[in-house]
Amino acid sequence: MAVVFLAVIALPVFLPDPPGDATPLSHWTSFATYALWGLWFPLVFLSVIFTGRSWCGLLCPMGAAAEWANRWGPRRPIPGWLRWEGTPVVSFLVVTVLGQTVGVRDHPEAALEVFGGTMLAAVVLGFLYGRRKRAWCRHACPIGLLLGVFSRIGAVQFAPKLARAGGDSWTEKGICPTMIDLPRKQESRHCIQCFRCVNPEARGSVELRLRRPGTEIEDIRAHHPNPVEVWFLFLGTGIALGGFLWLVLPHYQDLRQALGLFAIEHDWAWLGRAGPWWLMSVHPERREVFLWLDFTLIVGVMGTVMAALTAVLASLTAAAAFIAGPGLRTRFVELGYQYAPVAMVSLVVGLGGMLFQPLGAHAGAAKGALFALGVAWSLWLGWRILGRQAVAPARRLLALLPGLAGTLAVAAAWWPAIFGL
């Protein structure tokens, strides 16, 4: 898998640009682009519903490289800054913004920088920290936390045969590479499905169980709900949305024109200069050169959309929690998980739009059907979570309305990016 991964991200850099009529079957660069954004990205997200984070434990070259490097490193204790729960959140936001400013979907050099740089970071962190563990996978992977959130709605669960009380905890003891205290395991998000803990003959082992998709979130209060995870769900959905809206909304060009005129009037010449290649797209041979003006606006638009969507979802979730009854903080965290399906579908349909290209004229219908499924599933999860909170049916309907508004807000916000204006 590592060889295939390197061929996909590195080989296109050394090849001539594909002609305008190139297809994935006629040019390696076109194939690599489709493999990354039309197959790998959307299918990895969809796979968590059926197989959990099996990609992380069985196929991901970054996690494997990090664990391999750990064999030769000093194996230092994992520092507090790396164990901080906000580290993978920051990692995801930085990589997502950088991917937009360098044009990761359009330029092979940018894909090599983003994916290759992430691979290098995994190897370095794996080399330095932990003792035969995957500190990278648990604490820093930009996509790991996102897959972890979505794995909670999956149909696969690794559960201890003889569970101990006390809830999930972190430990470097034991066989788990992501440092799960296996006898106390309750949640799915950190489990990378590597099967190392599965031993059918051992009574104290972990076993693979199948469950109805969404079960863990329906009863999230019994599976270690985490406020950082919920805030990440809001922030991650918002930053990804912002990364698409600046491309499709005409307001971006109006704003760019206005800021450019303002810069000229105030002698801000630096905004009109091209920036470094590793920070923004500088490809004159492809007629794309970003200025500091473009970089500033892209980051600003993405940050603004992220903040706005987060504020909307947080406000509506707080309203639902308030209507549901006492215990606002606990109810807020639990109800925040209801947006997982619509957020996942938004990312799959939006960022993985190439997956639907072979459907031709039926692509729009397929996207719409998948999107409608995500909306309906989010509403169902909200209803079930409120039921677990012992909210009476009549009050539950009222408390579900903010969740409905939030789900529709996500759908409406993604509509221009997915289906056009």
Image (tube, rainbow, N blue to C red):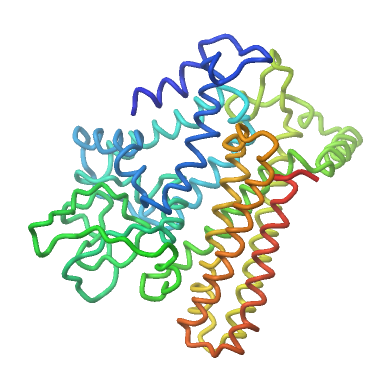
**Side of 205 relative to 40 (left or right):** left
Give the answer, above or below, for where 206 lies relative to 250: below
Task: Determine the residue positioned at 81% across, 41% down.
Answer: 252
**Side of 199 relative to 34 (left or right):** left
Q: In which quarter of the image is residue 299?
A: top right
Q: In which quarter of the image is the N terminus?
A: top left
Q: Residue furthest top?
A: 16
Q: Quadrant of residue 165?
A: bottom left
User: Foreground residue, 263 or 306?
Assistant: 306
**Side of 268 relative to 376 (left or right):** right
Give the answer, above or below, for where 157 lies relative to 249: below
Residue 160 % position (x, y)? 21, 65
User: Foreground residue, 255 or 188?
Assistant: 188
Q: In which quarter of the image is residue 341?
A: bottom right
Task: Determine the residue positioned at 49% across, 73% down.
Answer: 334
Task: Determine the residue positioned at 65% across, 54% down.
Answer: 306
Count of numbered tags: 0
Residue 413 % position (x, y)? 72, 55
Q: In which quarter of the image is the C terminus?
A: top right
**Side of 356 relative to 50 (left or right):** right
Residue 158 % position (x, y)? 27, 59
